[in-house]
Every structure is written in C-alpha cells, then in structure tokens.
Image (tube, grey):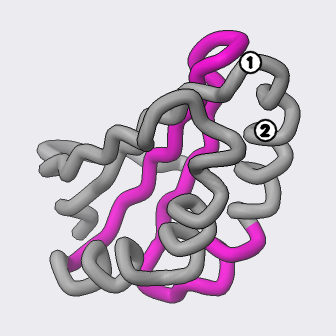
Amino acid sequence: MIKYALFARLEARPGKEQAVADFLAAGLEMANQEAGTPIWFALRLSSTTFGIFDAFTTESDRQAHLAGPIAQALVSNAPELLATPPQIEAIEVLGLKNQA
C-alpha cells in the first residue's frame, strides 16, 4: 500500500520557467527507472511555481529516492534554475484512489 510521499515546491528564476519545465519532463525518464517509485507527478502550479509529487510503499523507498538521481540532479541544477531552494515535505498518505 502507498503510505509515504514527498512534495517538492520549486520556484523558477525569472526567465527560467521553460528550463524548469524541461528539467521536470526529463525527470520522468529517471522516475521510470526507479522501481521503488510507483507514483511520480511533475506539476505546474503557476507560471513560475512547479512541483513534484511522488509516493512510495515503504520509508526505505522514499529515502532511496531522496538519495537517487532525481534528487541529485535537482540539487545540482537548483542554483541555476530556481529562485529559492526547493521546499521538500515528507507526507503521510491517508488514502489513495488510482484507476490508471
């Protein structure tokens, strides 16, 4: 059962909005390679604000994701792409409906 999740809020630097969108699109490829990440969303919340929501069945899968290639790429690209450091929140999933 999906019980653990993360939400990362990303604020693009002025003029870097498309670069952030492109970065997130590339992140989907990396997420597809992570067996422990069954749910991964890249989101646009406004013209300059983006997000990543991902969910996991175990805490160890969540920690592996936080130490994995997507997180590493985010940290290394943040100074160029983001106006502020990413805000990452650990979330407990209380319920899930998935018909996909």
State which quadrant residue 89 falls in: top left
Residue in the image at 52% along x and 34% along y: 10
Secondary structure type for disc 2: helix
What residue do we see at 19% from left, 47% from top? 91
- Say what amino acid the circle numbered 1 marks: Pro
Seen as rendered, the residue at the extreme front is 79
The x and y percentages for residue 88 are 31, 46
Please tell me which residue is depicted at 86% across the width and 32% down the height of the picture.
18
The mark total stands at: 2
Along the horizontal axis of the image, is 81 left or right of 92?
A: right
Residue type, label 2:
Ala
Observer-nearest of 6 and 88: 88
Which residue lies under the disc numbered 1? 14
Part of the protein shown in magenta:
29-58
Foreground residue, 59 or 51?
51
Which of the two discs, 1 and 2, sits closer to the camera? Answer: 1
Find disc 2 in the rendering and name its residue. 21
**Mark 1 element type:** loop
Q: Which mark is residue 86?
A: none
Q: Position of residue 73 (x, y in %)?
A: 62, 69
